């Protein structure tokens, strides 16, 4: 009998402890939810707009680039054009813009140069759509860390296996590449938008 009484007391004590633990957990939860004002948020961004470069790159320009990219399966990364300062040589400025390999069969390519500096460094994106009938790597995009020398923009793939070169030819870019597999190529890129042309159109 005594053993049974002791067991009953222990069981009752366990139930009481369990109830107290549950009540404590509920109280802690209520306290955590009772002060929403203490929760922190990031800074609210401004209203999104495609307009950039002081209005030189317009919503209409952005729509045209997106339409071309959608048609050819090209990924468009978020980008932001920077208007170069007066210390940037005039020969570097024409490289800011967006060009595509129009008139070519197979894979479609796009180069976006967003910034050039007085030391010739150039930043942007190299993006391309899916391969043509002959196959190849899938569609992709990578950041450009390029350099302008001898009137040409040069950069490499992230692995260093492919070297790219773009040379100004009027409003167009002459494109060549070579990789470690011994493959080479040439194409003419035409502009979808350039900073220099936008500045010329904006002149009074």
Image: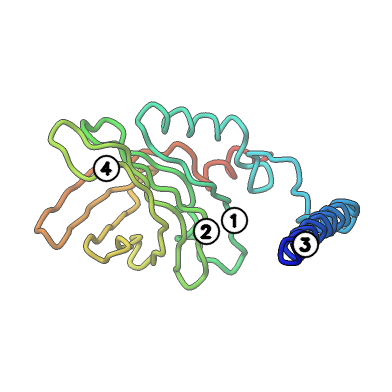
Report the side of 100 relative to 16 (left or right).
left
Please tell me which residue is depicted at 31% across the width and 54% down the height of the picture: 166
Q: Position of residue 77 (x, y in %)?
A: 49, 46
Q: Residue furthest bottom?
A: 119
Residues tagged 2 and 1 counted as in contact (Cβ below 8 A): yes
Q: Position of residue 202 (x, y in %)?
A: 64, 39
Check residue 82 in the rendering and tell me which mark sits there, or answer none.
1
Please tell me which residue is depicted at 78% across the width and 50% down the height of the picture: 44
Which marked residue is nearer to the observer: mark 3 or mark 1? 3
Q: Picture quarter containing residue 189?
A: top left
| Of the image marks 4 and 3, the number of the one nearer the N terminus | 3
Residues tagged 2 and 3 counted as in contact (Cβ below 8 A): no
Residues tagged 4 and 3 counted as in contact (Cβ below 8 A): no
Check residue 115 in the rendering and tell me which mark sits there, or answer none.
2
Q: Residues within 10 Å of mark 3 (few under 14, many from 20)?
A: few
In whole angstroms, how far apart are the C-alphas of marks 2 and 3?
A: 84 Å
The C terminus sits in image quarter = top right
Q: Residue furthest front?
A: 1
Helix, strand or loop at mark 1: loop
In whole angstroms, how far apart are the C-alphas of marks 4 and 1?
A: 30 Å
Helix, strand or loop at mark 4: loop
| Of the image marks 2 and 1, the number of the one nearer the N terminus | 1
| Of the image marks 3 and 1, the number of the one nearer the N terminus | 3
Q: Which residue is mark 4?
A: 138
């Amino acid at each position: 009998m005594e053993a049974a009484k002791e067991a009953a007391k222990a069981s009752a004590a366990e139930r009481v402890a369990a109830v107290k633990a549950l009540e404590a957990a509920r109280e802690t939860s209520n306290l955590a939810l009772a002060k929403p004002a203490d929760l922190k948020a990031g800074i609210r961004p401004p209203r999104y707009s495609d307009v950039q470069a002081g209005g030189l790159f317009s919503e209409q320009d952005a729509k045209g680039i997106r339409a071309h990219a959608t048609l050819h399966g090209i990924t468009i990364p978020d980008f932001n054009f920077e208007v170069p300062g007066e210390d940037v040589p005039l020969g570097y400025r024409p490289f800011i813009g967006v060009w595509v390999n129009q008139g070519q069969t197979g894979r479609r390519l796009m180069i976006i140069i967003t910034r050039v500096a007085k030391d010739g460094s150039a930043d942007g994106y190299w993006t391309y759509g899916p391969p043509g009938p002959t196959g190849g790597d899938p569609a992709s995009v990578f950041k450009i860390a390029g350099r302008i020398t001898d009137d040409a923009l040069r950069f490499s793939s992230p692995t260093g296996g492919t070297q790219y070169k773009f040379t100004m030819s009027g409003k167009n870019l002459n494109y060549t590449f070579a990789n470690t597999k011994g493959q080479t190529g040439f194409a003419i890129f035409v502009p979808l938008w350039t900073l220099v042309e936008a500045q010329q159109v904006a002149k009074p």
